[in-house]
Amino acid sequence: MKKSLFKAVILGVTVIFGGCKDDEVAGPGGETPGETREFISLTASIPDDEGTAGNGGTMAYAITHEQAIDPNFSVNIYDNGFGLRSARTARVQASEDGTELYNIQYTGEDGGVFNKYIVKGGKDYQDTGNELDLSDIIGTSPRWTKAAEDIGIGVHLTGFQTISDGVAPNHVYKYGRGKVRIARIDLKGASVPNSTEFDFPFTAELEAQGYSVGRIDVPVLNQAQSKVFIGCNVAKVDPTKLSYNASGVPTWANDAANRTLGTTTLVVDFPSLQNPKLIYSTLSKTNNHSYRTMTQYVGTDGHVYQATATGGKDILRIDKNTNEYDNSYHFDLDQALGLTGTRIQAWRYIKDGIGLVLYNIAGNGGYIAMIDLNAKTATKISNDYEAGLNFGQYQNLAVSGDYIYVPLTPTDLPGRLYVINWKTKDVIKGSVLTGKTGSSYLGSY
């Protein structure tokens, strides 16, 4: 398949089952967990042609809740699933009720192309034909999320360059900078109502100190739908430590150890995508741009809760009234669990301050904890695969009513779908998930 003839131009899901009150908000952009749903979609990665684990595409398979909790039911997603369009592991999003999947293809000939699927059960995913080529705006390796129900936000930092004055051996560092591109995506109509482009807005003073941002990701829309918050990968070099690489290009030494700038979030107005500004945490210096998993959620209280994933242990809060970091609030997973070296790999805000965290310890293993963001406590939930799990590519956790669905498979090996009652913390070791070399499950929708 070649890219669609339609190109989005740079300019500067469905009804939830069950009722909800206006003050009941949760999820990436304020939606409540669906009270009931017909299907839960599971996704898994497959290896590429060279055998690199998890690098060759994404399979999907939809099951019912009854199948999910049945320990005798088996899902062979690799042989019987539906292949989502993508040359590499897809970045999949879904409507809150699980009836629609959204994907923007990642790399390859059709990198940057948006596709939409209707979930029919099993391997039956109906391609709606709503195809949209976003590569001109957010590139062929897109960073995007469902930032609120029916609203996608794609982001891309492009054209990064390190600028200096002078000639060898006396180059003088000036700054490192790239351009921010943001696209608003209408997930219902598969269109781009508007987009924008601007230089990353660090001050000249911070740039001169060696600060730069080389990647942005995980955009979320606030409760009022007036601001978009975007995670940033902040880096720092030492402008006084110059060297030259084998090609004679000037380089400056990494200076992360002397970073004083806190966790940084880029903020733009919505729906205009204008007036960029930066906000900074005083409680953490760990980056918040994530890898493939959503790390920002609008809480039931309307505040945005942001994990410093995938390398940190913190959950920070952005105040709904000021749209600035609330530096009086800090959730520390180490403290909550009484451990050292925990790293949040993925998480899901559920409701009323309750969430589920997937984490490792000093980079090893895969563990689960139910957390209470109000009480700042955590309860570990044991699983049978802890030593062999790697949540590095994990993408999403589906919630329906009282249950959260957590597929657990070590790479190459079978596992099970853990269905956890988030109110009681009761665990059902549900359907069997078959394994395949170079493959593992990525999440539920």
Image (cartoon, grey):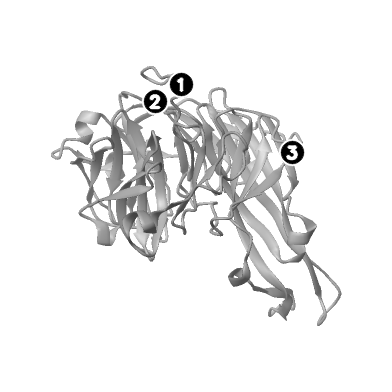
Labels 1 & 2 near each other (Cβ < 8 A): yes
Mark 1 surroundings: few (<14), some (14-19) or many (≥20) residues within 10 A = some
Residue found at the very far bottom of the displayed protein: 169
Query: Which residue corresponds to the image point at 41% horizontal and 39% vertical from the top-left?
Result: 349
* Residue 44 seen by the camera: no
Q: Earlier in the sequence, mark 3 or mark 2?
A: 2
Mark 3 surroundings: few (<14), some (14-19) or many (≥20) residues within 10 A = few
The image shows residue 411 at horizontal and vertical percentages of 31, 57
Tag 3: amino acid = Asn
Q: CA distance from mark 3 to mark 1?
A: 30 Å
The image shows residue 308 at horizontal and vertical percentages of 49, 53
Q: CA distance from mark 3 to mark 2?
A: 35 Å
Tag 1: amino acid = Thr
Find residue 418 and report its image quarter: top left
Tell us which disc is closer to us: 3 or 2: 3
Tag 2: amino acid = Thr
Q: Earlier in the sequence, mark 3 or mark 1?
A: 1
Secondary element type, mark 3: loop
Where is mark 1, residue-wise? 14
Where is mark 3, residue-wise? 275
Residue found at the very far front of the displayed protein: 328
The image shows residue 356 at horizontal and vertical percentages of 35, 44
Tell us which disc is closer to us: 3 or 1: 3
- Find residue 99 and name its label: 2
Secondary element type, mark 1: loop
